[in-house]
Image (cartoon, rainbow, N blue to C red):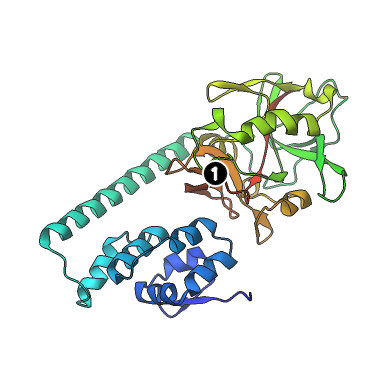
């Protein structure tokens, strides 16, 4: 199927950001009615929105518009109610209108409080000397397996372990890691690229990192496949969310603390990860965080532009890349 653009409020719509900026409920409702909205979302790999739109049932325009506004986060459901009232397409009692307005005002208040909280967090994590931003070319430490001592600095890269390059053959390539933090004789590192594409959990429900399948895979199969026995001795077991892990993925707080530069937040996928299903946009992929999203079936992830999607994605979807992280002896 050939890709096509939508038009909303007289503007060309190529992605969700443009849809949000130029949202016109009449235009979007028409695209929903003729099926083009679902096709447009599916072709651009907006899986969460595609699934939600596809599940909308009923023929009542007000109800459909409410749901579309909620899905795309545009002016909440109150926008659709106001639009319907303006066109005399439905009638709403005073009590119902007041209830909806109160709900909308509370949602806006919660958003403002969350923004203020994030601003305070950002201020407390202001860049310090050595903070990772990758604004200049980092020093690269070639394959470090046999080096007894590493003189690393935050922002350096090192080569450590190897993982598959393609699904067709058992070829492997050396893994590059970015140094995020140094504490005494140990360093926190994260893979520069997305190494594989896997769901966070096999089940649609996500009860946290301690019981998810991705954790088991990283500390089991991945650890055995990517590192030799000598290399595994260099990896430090670390307390993560109440458990002990050798390898893990970042949560949203660690993301904000260690990755302040956009170049370190944006991630490219290896050829193997692409073959395994990692979705690519403008050369970059989305990658998982271990933080719960806004529902029991979702977890937060980093979008291709390096920004966290706070609402999250279905945890059993395999289109997100995996960027392993770990502490190693230096």
Q: Where in the figure is residue 4, as x and y percent of width and height? A: 57, 76
Pick out the residue farthest to the left: 94
**Up-down relation of residue 3 to residue 313 (above or below):** below
Identify the element where label 1 is drawn: loop
Crowding around mark 1 (Cα neighbors within 10 Å: few <14, some 14 to 19, many 20+) is many
**Image quarter of the C terminus:** top right
Q: Nearer the viewer, residue 149 or 234?
A: 234
Residue that sits furthest to the bottom in the current view? 10
Q: Residue at x 28, y 48 (%)?
A: 109
Residue 299 visible somewhere in the drawing: yes
Q: Position of residue 125 (x, y in %)?
A: 50, 35
Q: Is residue 326 left or right of residue 300?
A: right
In the figure, residue 175 lies in which quadrant?
top right
223 horizontally vs 284: left or right:
right
The x and y percentages for residue 283 are 69, 59
User: Would you say residue 126 is visible in this rendering?
Assistant: no
Between 6 and 206, which is closer to the camera in this rendering? 206
Read off the residue under disc 1.
315
The residue lying at 39 percent from left, 62 percent from top is: 56
Q: Residue at x 57, y 21 (%)?
A: 243
């Amino acid at each position: 199927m050939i890709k096509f653009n939508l038009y909303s409020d007289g503007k060309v719509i190529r992605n969700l950001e443009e849809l949000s900026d130029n949202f016109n409920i009449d235009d979007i409702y028409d695209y929903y009615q003729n099926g083009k909205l679902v096709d447009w979302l599916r072709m651009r790999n907006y899986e969460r929105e595609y699934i939600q739109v596809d599940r909308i049932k009923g023929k009542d325009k007000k109800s459909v518009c409410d749901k579309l506004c909620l899905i795309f986060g545009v002016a909440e459901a109150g926008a659709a109610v106001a639009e319907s009232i303006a066109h005399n397409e439905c009638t709403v009692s005073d009590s119902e209108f007041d209830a909806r307005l109160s709900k909308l005002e509370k949602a806006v208040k919660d958003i403002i409080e969350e923004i203020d909280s994030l601003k305070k967090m950002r201020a407390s994590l202001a860049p310090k000397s050595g903070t990772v931003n990758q604004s200049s070319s980092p020093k690269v430490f070639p394959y470090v397996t046999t080096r007894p001592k590493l003189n690393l600095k935050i922002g350096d890269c090192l080569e450590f372990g190897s993982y598959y390059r393609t699904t067709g053959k058992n070829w492997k390539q050396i893994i590059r890691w970015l140094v995020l933090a140094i504490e005494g004789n140990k360093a926190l590192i994260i893979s520069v690229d997305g190494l594989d594409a896997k769901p966070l959990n096999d089940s649609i429900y996500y009860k946290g990192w301690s019981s998810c399948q991705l954790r088991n895979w990283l500390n089991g199969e991945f650890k055995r496949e990517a590192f030799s026995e000598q290399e595994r001795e260099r990896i430090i077991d670390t307390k993560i969310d109440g458990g002990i892990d050798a390898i893990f993925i970042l949560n949203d707080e660690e993301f904000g603390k260690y990755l302040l530069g956009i170049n370190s937040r944006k991630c490219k996928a290896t050829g193997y990860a692409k073959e395994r299903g990692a979705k690519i946009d403008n050369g970059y992929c989305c990658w998982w965080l271990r933080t719960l999203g806004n529902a029991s079936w979702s977890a937060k992830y980093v979008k291709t532009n390096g920004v966290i999607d706070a609402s999250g994605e279905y945890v059993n979807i395999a289109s997100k890349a995996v960027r392993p992280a770990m502490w190693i002896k230096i």
